[in-house]
Image: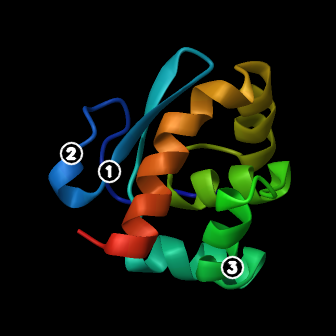
Amino acid sequence: MNAVAGSSGASANPVRGEAALTVAGRTITLRPTFAALVAAEGELGPLFALVERAAGGGLTLNELAGLLWHCAIDSGERGAFCDALVAGGLAAATPALRVLLGQILGGR
């Protein structure tokens, strides 16, 4: 289970590079900390390659869900998070994904 210290449901703080994602009616704060990005990279491969795949339209559902889950604060059990993400429609996750990819490239 992914549980980064912090409060879910609070407004995302753009100064910290955070993004908000609504999943199953619950707003989850995504925080791309060093630890979260290292965990995502360990699972998904190099983050720069992931950004390139995303830019080219080649990001897989597994990569999208994995990156969001690793960066989510108190996201709960991964399977339930992923199911809710898909049920809400992938387009709903696009703004949060854009913020995270920007943070990977530019930092904060």
Label number found at residue 67: none
Q: Earlier in the sequence, mark 3 or mark 2?
A: 2
- Cα separation, mark 1 vs mark 3, equals 21 Å
Instruction: Using the rendered image of the protein, determine whether residue 74 is visible from the camera's viewpoint.
Output: no
Q: How crowded is mark 2: few (under 14 residues within 10 Å), some or many (20 or more)?
A: few
Between 9 and 107, which is closer to the camera in this rendering?
A: 107
Contact between labelled residues 1 and 2, with CB atoms less than 8 Å apart: yes
The residue located at (70%, 19%) in the rendering is: 88
Q: Mark 2 points at which residue?
A: 13
Amino acid at pointer 3: Ala
- Cα separation, mark 2 vs mark 1, equals 5 Å
Label number found at residue 18: 1
The residue located at (59%, 80%) in the rendering is: 48
Q: Name the residue under label 3.
A: 49
- Cα separation, mark 3 vs mark 2, equals 26 Å
Amino acid at pointer 1: Glu
Q: In this view, does 108 lie to the left or right of 21?
A: left
- Above or below residue 26? Residue 48 is below
The residue located at (49%, 36%) in the rendering is: 95
Instruction: Using the rendered image of the protein, determine whether residue 97 is visible from the camera's viewpoint.
Output: yes
| Element on which disc 1 rests | loop
Of labels 1 and 3, the one closer to you: 3
